[in-house]
Amino acid sequence: MEYYKVLDGGKACHGGNATYYLPHGNRPGKWMPPVVGEIAPCAIGYHVWTIGQLLGGLGPEVYEAEIRGDVVKQEDKTVARQIRLIRKLNWDERIARLFACDCAEHVLPIFEKEYPNDKRPCQAIEVARRFAGGEATADELAAAWTAAWTAAGAAAGAAAWAAAWAAAGAAAGDAAGDAAWAAAGAAAGDAAW
């Protein structure tokens, strides 16, 4: 099974205080020291995600990871006694913004069902895609974000509002990593709802 670890500047970004041994070129990082005590999610152990769990753990840096020793699997995360990072994945602001656009497009039909004539969230996604490709300015992005935010505020139903916010704030937001996380979470939540 493949596992992933999310870091920020080589350090844990979802709690914890470990600084990880990073991979160099084609060489994986060293194994982190094994944790002592009983593995307990959110308390003791190295937290990783499977591909199906990764949506809830996205952040600035994503690494493929290998784990060993005792493992506790939960619905939203996996916790292990020991970990090493195999390689850094290609995840940057541009890719995160495009991912946010994909997630926002996934929930856009929820908004459009309630407000078929309001194209502001869709336009925000288009501008965010162009911005990611260097074809739109920061001012255009900010204007699209504001217009889509207004559309979200005007949405009456909770699902329509959440979908509009996902499309607006996430796709056109300034922090692409946060935007991807917010859009992905909204997409998953709205789809389930």
Image (cartoon, helix red, strand yellow):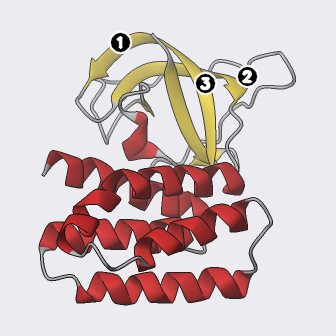
Is label 1 in a helix, a strand or a loop? strand
The Cα atoms of the two marked residues, 1 and 2, are separated by: 20 Å
Q: Which residue is mark 2?
A: 29
How crowded pointer 3 is (Cα within 10 Å; few <14, some 14-19, many 20+) is rated as many
Is label 3 in a helix, a strand or a loop? strand
Q: Which residue is mark 3?
A: 64
The Cα atoms of the two marked residues, 3 and 1, are separated by: 19 Å
Q: Is 86 displayed left or right of 57 in the figure? A: right
Residue 175 in view, yes or no: no
Of residues 48 and 131, the one drawn nearer to the viewer in this rendering: 131
Q: Residue furthest right?
A: 25
Residue depicted at x 36% and y 26%: 79
Percent from the top left, x then y, of residue 15?
44, 51
Percent from the top left, x then y, of residue 36?
40, 24
Quadrant of image for the N terminus: top left
The Cα atoms of the two marked residues, 2 and 3, are separated by: 11 Å
